[in-house]
Amino acid sequence: MNNAHEVEATQVAAYFNVDPEVGLSDTDVFKARSRYGRNELAPEEATPLWRLILKQFDDLLVKILLAAAVTDFVIALSDGEGVLGALVEPFVIALILVANATVGVVTERNAEKAIEELKAYEAESATVLRSGQLQLVPSGDLVPGDVVEVSVGNKVPADVRLCILLSNVMRVDQSILTGESHTVDKQVRPVLKEKPVYQDKTNMLFSGTLVTSGRARGIVVGTGASTAIGQIRDALALAGRGGNGDEENRTPLKQKLDEFGTLLSKVIAGICVLVWVINIRRFSDPALGGWLSGALYYLKTAVALAVAAIPEGLPAVVTTCLALGTRKMAKQNAIVRSLPSVETLGCTTVICSDKTGTLTTNMMSAVGCAVVQSAAAGGASLMEFEITGTTYSPEGMILGPSGAVLQRPADSPCLLHLAMAASLCNDSALVYRPDKGTYQRIGEATELALRVFAEKVGLPASVGDHHGPLYVSSNSAAAGLGAGRSREMHCNAHWAERFNRNATLEFTRDRKMMSVMAVGDARSVMWSKGAPESIIARCSSGAPESIIARCSSVLANNGEGVVPLTESARQQIMQAVQRYGRRALRTLALAYKPLPASSKALVAEDEADLVFLGLVTMHDPPRPECHKALQLCQQAGIRVVMVTGDNKATAEAVAREVGMLPRGADNEDALAGVSYTGTEFDALASSEARSTAAESLVVLARVEPLHKLRLVELLRAQGHVVAMTGDGVNDAPALARADIGVAMGSGTAVAKGAADMVLADDNFATIVSAVAEGRAIYNNTKQFIRYMISSNIGEVVAIFVAALLGVPEVLTPVQLLWVNLVTDGLPATALGFNRPDKDIMSRCPRRLDEPIVNGWLFVRYLVVGLYVGLATVAGFLWWYLMYGEGGGLTWSQLSSFQLCKEPAAQAAGYSCSVFENRHPRTIAMSVLVVVEMFNALNNLSEDASLLTIPPWDNRWLLGAIATSLALHGLILYAPPAALLFGVTGLSGAEWMAVLWLSAPVILVDELMKHLSRTVIRARQQRRQGGMQLTEVLVGDKAGGAHHSDGAHASGSGSSMMERIGLRAGVDKSH
């Protein structure tokens, strides 16, 4: 039944043919179960392991590598090599690919667990009325039409339409479904609102939510997949598949690497075919043993080219670099669950952020109070106080109207009585845990704020053991309090010891207030409090209007005592309430009434002729670092949208406070097009209108799960890279569908399972820090791709030129494989430790269509690669043609090596065995290794010169270069390794030649960088219309110098949060 909320309970009972006083019969239950099935979420069919494994190899570069490995194995066998010898190269390639595939399988398995964790929110049992008798049954046995009874502490077993309240009040915590920050009052009457969201359906209980107060009966209207939480499960499953059943949800880096791989594979295939074709005339060379043998020989050369051109270590280095990024982020409270998401953060263009606990502290705090200063001569004057401190720690001050600190707030009659009322008319508890440095919280956020308010007011001077306000930490010693006790609820404990609560009048919807009777000091007093009408559904108290209407007197703060509440004073108080309401502050009115000593209980009639004490205003304060983080987002070209389940006025007020909306934007005209409720957003005329609204949206309030999902899909359709935050079950589909799902550390297991990243501190500033880290990782990824590709181009050039010249093989496939995987792999990984550019958060996010290798970068790769290849071949030729202790050959002798006959060679003064000498290939391999080490230094920055970023700026890179050179020396001078790789030790003269040929690569790249800075960058800026972003200088806190031309911020020990200026003193007391 989809419209149960909008009809009378009797109509719901008639629809299911059930009597709410009797329930269903066993026959009715059997029929309903046959029709609707069991009340449980069916297990999602998991992807078979074999399919996940095959999916990891569905990549063009991987397929080419596998083909090259198989071809090399077949050729090796045909050349007479043993099986073990032929398996060396294919085995190493396969090992790398298997390691990479394992990471992918584990990541996808973790994502599927999110759907399974939804079952944790199913109730295990339910109290159901059947055949006139209450009985306890497994929740899975419930069927639509069952009459169930729920009470405080119960988990709602299905979607239920309330039909009768068995207590004065019924409250439910449905935050896992709606994201509301407070419990919701439930009632029985129909909800007639057009297109209501879950928050509006106050006569419905939703499966998996928790009853916090009261007792009620209702009729089950939805079970299993038909419940609200079941629909979320279906949406989560669909979102996990990328929005449809076929399309994979690929990250930007994955897309760019795939595009690059496609381009590279085409280039490789073209070069391999070209090398094979240009040597067709040599297939029939007698030295090769015939046409077929010649074709096979040059096919082996083509395979060597493929091995040389493909960066075998690239997948492993990308994975390692992303893993390093996850470690850095974890230190900053951002725990990454999906490795590719680390980089995706760097191109985020929109962050859809929750309000409560992310932009705010999720710690309701009293921010002000107002009392009647004087009511003499029929007039009235209101005095307002400001309250500092935004956590549950009782540290803060009471400031007078002039801004001066009140040294003894409790000596003020009204403040003292406000604190007593706040402490005694309160059902919450706040206990300090010194072992963890946190507070254990029980109860409503509003009442917790009142507890802390009472502590900040302190105790009057008449209390002998309290010599000053506890909030002044410097006075704690003078007050005789230890460091631990200064954080305890000392004042609340004092009032609880002096007064016993003998009776309570719970809040009801009609009275809109709560009262308690406290007995102590030989007197009996009734304390009362209430809250504004707008928040009845989210707090445990009533409206100031209700309190004020029942007050006949007021306690004056100037010493006049209790005086009549004049009409003038009443109007001033109501005007203050309205003023606070416009600021979206939660306002409570507090009052008291002396009772006869003989009073034993309270009745509603006692709540008359009250003495008004004052107003207390409170709100959930923004995080102190949030404003700076939002400024950084604006400078970085990132739009932030607040998406919350709370009401629109509160959301807009917080948005103004943190800077998302202008301070003066408090009318409908100013907010038109930027602030909507979920219902208003749905009501827009067309999908085009919603898409247009999404472009300018700043606040989306009163949302339900599908609103978040639709918003993500709208933004992604517009080409945005979307990061979505959330903590509840309701957020899971949107988290899974977003490019980056960010779950709160305090959130549900389902949200964490669906997310790519979890914030341990629930802090928006941590997201911004992670975005900066993501940008740095992408830059470093480009650098090591540039390094590896330019090195591989050099290898291709060396083999291609050697084949073109007709000289012996410069490098063997096994030597190339060693260079690519081991020698190159370490420096490439170390480039992941490059420090971020100082202006990393001053640039717009890169475009999604921006290739990872653009035209100019590819030209740079070719230029540097050409030098690497030519230097490698030059080293090889130098030994044969120019080195005095080398081959001593002429060019014609070297280029006709295949025709060498020993008698003719000896007659010419050399031996054919010279072509088997290991020195020339060793020199060529050494030149390749050393030139690539110099090239690694070039990649400390894309455009900055080595004169501004010295090599020691990345000590990890220096260590990696030293290790790579040591490994190269190992295979040269360790006989078994030298034999395996076909190399040998070199003389001093040979090493000098290696250095002379290798070092100039630095000059080549410095020229390329100079062109980038002076020509290419200026051209790009002209294309962008001269748009400039304000540069955010980072690194000051780490004490590092700033370098020009994109230099990096120094201070390797500093976190990204420090570098981008988001270091905040975080109070861990909460």
Image (tube, rainbow, N blue to C red):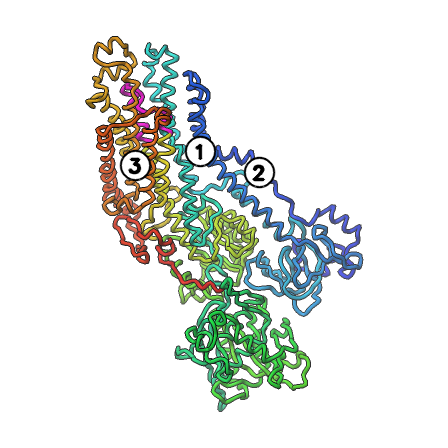
Q: Secondary structure at mark 3?
A: helix
Q: Amino acid at mark 3?
A: Met
Which residue does the image show at 42% across and 16% down from the upper left? 80
Residue receiving disc 3: 933
Give the magenta part as a residue range: 792-817
| Real-space Cα separation, disc 2 to disc 1, in angstroms | 24 Å
The answer to whether residue 172 shows anywhere in this view is: yes
In the drawing, what numbered circle is on residue 96? 1
Image location (x, y in percent) of residue 577: 50, 75
Decide: is 491 above or below 819: below
Decide: is 249 above or below 152: above
| Real-space Cα separation, disc 1 to disc 3, in angstroms | 22 Å
Residue receiving disc 2: 47
Q: Are marks 3 and 2 in contact (CB under 8 Å)?
A: no
The one of 377 and 838 positioned closer to us in this rendering: 838
The one of 469 and 1060 positioned closer to us in this rendering: 469
Q: Secondary structure at mark 2?
A: loop
Q: Is residue 861 magenta?
A: no
Frontmost of labels 3 and 2 is 3
Q: Secondary structure at mark 1?
A: helix
Decide: is 948 above or below 489: above
Which residue does the image show at 32% across and 49% down from the upper left? 837
Splitting the image into 4 quarters, where does residue 289 fall? top left
Left or right: residue 243 versus residue 283 is right
Q: Are marks 1 and 3 in contact (CB under 8 Å)?
A: no
Q: Is residue 802 magenta?
A: yes
Q: Amino acid at mark 1?
A: Ile
